[in-house]
Image (tube, rainbow, N blue to C red):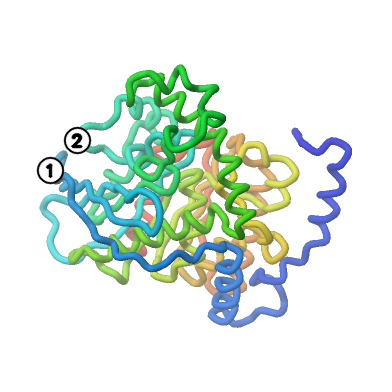
Amino acid sequence: MEIVLGKYFDMVKDHLSQLQYPLSFLSDTHTDVEQWQSKARKAVKSLLGYQPPKTALDPIIHDEYIKDGLIYQHVSYAQPYGPRTVGILMRPEKAAGKLPGFLGLHDHGGFKYYGKEKITAPKKPPAIMKDYQAHYYGGRAWASELALKGYVVFVPDVFLWGSRKIMPEDLSARYVKAWQEGLNQPVDSDAYIQAYNDYAAFAEHDITKTFIEAGMTWPGVTVHDDMRALDFLLTQPDVDADNLGCAGLSGGGNRTVYLAAMDERIKCTCCAGFMSTASEFALYKVFTHTWMMYIPGLTELMDFPDLYSIHGKKPTMVLYAVDDPLFTPKGQQDADKRLKAIYTKMGTPELYSGLFFPGPHKFDVEMQETAFAFFDKWLK
């Protein structure tokens, strides 16, 4: 098992072994789900550390067309800081009445140049996305596939991706000089995109340190972006506000955990390829994950699966890949056991579904169809 601490491994291992996770619902001090949920959510909100001023959405429709039975709208809306969010809204062409609303949450993937395009099939998809979708998604744009099944699906760019990315020209030369040759290539070319992704991976470290020093967190900004996307989705007159869901793979699974924990409007969720315990993350797999996932102080209060369980007595699914190199087998298995125990203590064991699939890190067609059936059961 690969570790990064050498002879200091036991220092962190011993610390982790002493943690009591006082804000886990499994703690004997918690018996009332709603009271615990309110207390836990308040504590996590404080740790997230990002409370921007309220800002009007000011939505704009930039393009609208019909493709393969779906009405597509490319839209944008304002944010308190930084560029407007651009997203893709999809609904069945011939649908009538209220439909379940759904947020499709794109992944991290070490690929920040594009966001929403990773899981949609717009009019002019970037050519580079074909191989990307083949590798992680079985060759499908899963958010578009879900819309065809009778959902209003919105896929927004999140902070640092796509329309919300930080452009190289906005930063000093120290961040871009190693990739300047690639960044001098034509915009949207494969060479430019690769250089951008490399630069963005480097800049990620200082962005995170800036937030932490300022008393903010990257997850706090992520949660705000995704809650604002839900605000936008709820402006659509054909969205059933009582039946809202979200899902994503990897970084999108991480976003699913955050959003489920912090926004009570979400009813049904599926986290694909992003679930383990804090101890296995810290001891063995810290190098496989982005700064995007870390909430300083959280592990003193609860384990990572506990964060997802703040969703409460609502339909909750995790899809695990047995051979996923981003997680240890033990971490995935222990997380599954912990979530089962939590939902059993809540008195709703039927609301948690943890399923293991063979293969590496992915959200392939079989996993997608499993999730779609889950959404149909609880949102329709």
Q: Quadrant of residue 240?
A: bottom left
Q: Tell me what residue is drawn at x 61 percent, y 60 percent.
A: 215
Q: Looking at the image, which is closer to me, 60 or 125?
A: 60
- At mark 1, the secondary structure is strand
Q: Tell me what residue is drawn at x 63 percent, y 50 percent.
A: 276
Q: Are marks 1 and 2 in contact (CB under 8 Å)?
A: yes
**Residue type of the residue flagged with mark 1:** Tyr
Q: Tell me what residue is drawn at x 40 percent, y 29 percent.
A: 132
* Residue 163 sits above or below residue 316 on the image: above
Q: Which residue is mark 2?
A: 123
Marks 1 and 2 sit apart, C-alpha to C-alpha, by: 8 Å
Q: Quadrant of residue 341?
A: bottom right
Residue 380 showing in the rendered view: no
Q: Quadrant of the N terminus?
A: top right
Residue 177 showing in the rendered view: yes
Left or right of 28: which side holds 131?
left
Left or right of 249: which side holds 45?
right
Q: Tell me what residue is drawn at x 45 percent, y 43 percent.
A: 160
Rendered location of residue 190, percent (x, y): 38, 21
- At mark 2, the secondary structure is loop
Badge 2, how many Cα within 10 Å: few under 14, some, many 20+? few
Q: Looking at the image, which is closer to me, 329 or 77?
A: 77
* Residue 207 sits above or below residue 42 on the image: above
Q: Looking at the image, which is closer to me, 95 or 254?
A: 254
* Residue 65 sits above or below residue 78 on the image: above
In the drawing, what numbered circle is on residue 369?
A: none
Rendered location of residue 186, percent (x, y): 33, 20
Left or right of 228: which side holds 147?
left
Q: Which residue is mark 1?
A: 65
